[in-house]
Image (cartoon, grey):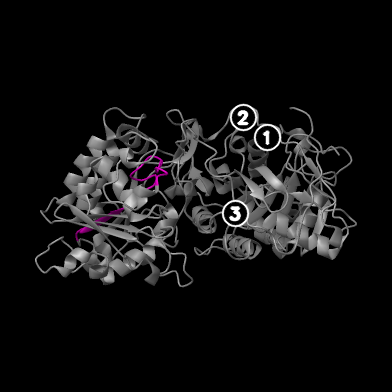
């Protein structure tokens, strides 16, 4: 396991310096070629395994959270002698993210409340199962949760493995926390085994079920007869989703990353739900309400939301594709600034030869996981989509958050000869002077200022606006002779093809904007070419040839692909969940040891905070 790494690092408070995650560390080719679509790699991913005999209609009743790098971003334990100012500083370091605006703790509280009683009216139980190795055991974890005002949402906290002379559990009864000893010592030190035992013997893990009060009645109603299908584990460690004996059927994997963090320097294997994207909260919330929509497979999944009878058979007129991990498998954008500013840029225009045309096509678009040329198949797909089964003309568009803007995306499409099928490209996250829009007329592309700043920063809101005023988004429509098939456009005429499920429903406060017809592209982790392991890859048809036929069939007759809630459950039909993963999600090798790191002498102005990061989940704390 290696020696314990100990070092002294000052922690600071007050005005904190800018900090960035260490992007681009995966997939460096040695020649300077790096994956540039990094946003997807830092998001939560949820999935339901396809397991024989599993009751997919069984609702989620128990949501179990890991603590270190799942609820916390990093974990620094408090000392009994810490002052209130030191406690506040620890709370900020452990829980607050510098990468997303707003109060992460408040977002977690809202998440927990919405899971405990969801939009579908179902109640659920929340617990924590942690391998935190701090010397105070479950008491230390409870203290951090209490300081952050998070403890009130949980019914129990379990710590593993059991340690002699320490309680390995606490439960909450009528607002008060009480120690107890769950049967942790009887079980293998694997979370899947522990949760299997919880499902079959809930009273041994929730002592309050034996009491006669409101909490007891609530838990008895929810957990009596509990099945493994009713448990969701949220964790940053893949190997926790499976053991030699049991599997977790429903899980959410929290993204891990390395970062220069605040003043403590480079921190490896950081995590945290919502640390890099607010979409994590909606992803998790929707998954626990609708897990059967997130099957673990590698095929595209298309759905049409319920529409009024008079609109059900309205035809598809506009198909909008995401770019990163939807048209590409992973995006490798050239570093040369001309790529994002000059239409028609080629690798030979760069001052240094970073890419060849063939390498750009292969790394971005061609799939090593399927036979034949994926680019040729995409060209055939786009041709079939442009004219519907009923002869109706359609338009194709790209809606991207790629920072290289519309021109950068256009140039990658051009080198693969895919641009000719699209009418317009919109960019929601262009950097600097990079164009927010590009459009095509008779084979000639030009840039324009797409009105992305006039709508809420979400794809569902943008497409709602496109349906209301298409001429603002398609400059071609200013020509009375131009016919791109968008006359009388309405929202049900639009299909969005995307690898991010959170893009199908707005995150705005009113929650009204939603995509009515959509296709979700599968995500997966894979060793890719000479890049090594890449996480959160995608790509329509990257693994399954059936993806192309599915999309064509959906565009022709979307009413044959109804949104499928669980039969017999009265639930909200507009659920969103996260990305289906591969069956390869579980790492069967032993988890790498994460030894605790000692930090002392934090900030002289508040008395020299002494704390340590206790992310080691496999061995006792050593000081």
Q: Are marks 1 and 2 in contact (CB under 8 Å)?
A: yes
Q: Is residue 128 left or right of residue 575?
A: right
Q: Nearer the viewer, residue 172 or 500?
A: 500
Q: Which residue is mark 3?
A: 275
Q: Which residues are magenta?
A: 315-336
| Tally of marks | 3
Residue 320 occupies quadrant? bottom left
Q: For the residues marked 1 and 3, what is the alpha-carbon distance in whole angstroms?
A: 26 Å
Q: Is residue 321 magenta?
A: yes
Q: Nearer the viewer, residue 130 or 174?
A: 130
Q: For the residues marked 3 and 2, what is the alpha-carbon distance in whole angstroms?
A: 32 Å
Q: Is residue 204 left or right of residue 585?
A: right
Q: Mark 1 or 2 closer to N-term?
A: 1
Q: Nearer the viewer, mark 1 or mark 3?
A: 3
Q: Is residue 152 left or right of residue 108?
A: right
Asked whether residue 123 is in view, the answer is yes
Residue 190 numbered tag: 1
Residue 373 on image: x %, y %: 26, 31
Residue 581 on image: x %, y %: 47, 40
Q: Mark 3 or 2 closer to N-term?
A: 2
Q: Secondary structure at mark 2?
A: loop
Residue 454 occupies quadrant? bottom left
Image position of 162 with respect to 490: above or below: above
Q: Which residue is mark 2?
A: 245
Question: Which residue corresponds to the image point at 41% horizontal and 38% vertical from the top-left?
Answer: 297
Q: Secondary structure at mark 3?
A: loop
Q: Nearer the viewer, mark 3 or mark 2?
A: 3
Asked whether residue 566 is in view, the answer is no
């Amino acid at each position: 396991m290696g020696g314990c790494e100990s070092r002294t690092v000052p922690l600071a408070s007050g005005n904190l310096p800018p900090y960035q995650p260490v992007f681009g560390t995966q997939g460096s080719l040695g020649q300077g070629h790096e994956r540039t679509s990094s946003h997807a790699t830092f998001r939560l991913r949820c999935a339901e395994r396809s397991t024989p005999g599993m009751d997919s209609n069984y609702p989620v009743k128990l949501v179990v959270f890991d603590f270190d790098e799942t609820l916390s971003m990093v974990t620094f334990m408090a000392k009994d002698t810490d002052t209130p100012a030191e406690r506040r500083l620890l709370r900020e370091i452990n829980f607050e993210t510098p990468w997303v605006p707003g109060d992460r703790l408040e977002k977690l509280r809202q998440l927990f409340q919405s899971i405990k009683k969801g939009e579908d009216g179902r109640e659920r139980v929340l617990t924590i199962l942690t391998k935190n190795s701090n010397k105070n055991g479950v008491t230390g974890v409870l203290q951090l949760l209490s300081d952050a005002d998070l403890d009130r949402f949980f019914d129990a906290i379990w710590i593993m493995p059991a340690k002699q002379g320490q309680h390995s559990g606490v439960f909450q009864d009528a607002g008060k926390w009480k120690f107890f000893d769950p049967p942790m010592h009887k079980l293998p030190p694997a979370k899947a085994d522990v949760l299997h035992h919880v499902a079959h013997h809930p009273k041994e893990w929730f002592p309050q079920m034996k009491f006669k009060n409101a909490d007891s009645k609530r838990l008895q109603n929810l957990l009596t007869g509990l099945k493994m299908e009713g448990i969701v584990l949220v964790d940053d460690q893949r190997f926790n989703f499976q053991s030699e004996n049991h599997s977790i059927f429903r899980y959410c994997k929290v993204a891990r990353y390395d970062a220069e963090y605040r003043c403590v320097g480079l921190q490896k294997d950081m995590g945290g739900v919502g640390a890099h994207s607010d979409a994590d909260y909606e992803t998790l919330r929707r998954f626990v309400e609708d897990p059967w929509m997130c099957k673990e497979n590698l095929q595209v999944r298309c759905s049409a939301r319920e529409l009024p009878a008079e609109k059900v058979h309205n035809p598809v007129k506009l198909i909008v594709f995401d770019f990163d991990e939807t048209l590409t498998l992973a995006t490798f954008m050239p570093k040369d600034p001309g790529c994002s500013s000059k239409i028609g840029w080629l690798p030979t225009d760069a001052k240094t030869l970073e890419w060849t045309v063939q390498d750009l096509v292969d790394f971005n678009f061609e799939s090593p996981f399927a036979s034949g040329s994926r680019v040729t198949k995409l060209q055939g797909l786009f041709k079939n989509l442009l004219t519907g089964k009923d002869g109706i003309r359609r338009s194709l568009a790209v809606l991207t958050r790629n920072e290289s803007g519309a021109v950068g995306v256009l140039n990658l499409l051009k080198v693969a000869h895919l641009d000719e099928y699209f009418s317009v490209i919109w960019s929601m996250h262009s950097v600097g002077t990079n164009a927010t829009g590009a459009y095509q007329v008779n084979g000639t592309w030009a840039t324009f200022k797409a009105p992305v700043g006039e709508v809420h920063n979400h794809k569902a809101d943008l497409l709602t606006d496109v349906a209301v005023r298409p001429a603002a988004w398609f400059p071609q429509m200013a020509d009375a002779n131009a016919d791109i098939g968008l006359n009388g456009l309405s929202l049900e005429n639009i299909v969005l093809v995307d690898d991010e499920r959170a893009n199908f429903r707005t995150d705005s406060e009113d929650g009204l904007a939603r995509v009515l017809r959509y296709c979700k592209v599968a995500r997966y982790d894979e060793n890719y070419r000479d890049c090594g392991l890449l996480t959160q890859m995608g790509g329509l048809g990257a693994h399954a040839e059936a993806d192309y036929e599915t999309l064509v069939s959906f565009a022709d007759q979307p009413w044959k692909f109804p949104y499928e809630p669980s039969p017999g459950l009265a639930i909200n039909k507009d659920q969103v969940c996260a990305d289906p993963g591969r069956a390869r999600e579980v790492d069967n090798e032993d988890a790498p040891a994460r030894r605790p790191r000692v930090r002392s002498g934090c900030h002289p102005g508040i008395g020299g905070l002494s704390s340590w990061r206790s992310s080691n989940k496999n061995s006792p704390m050593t000081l």
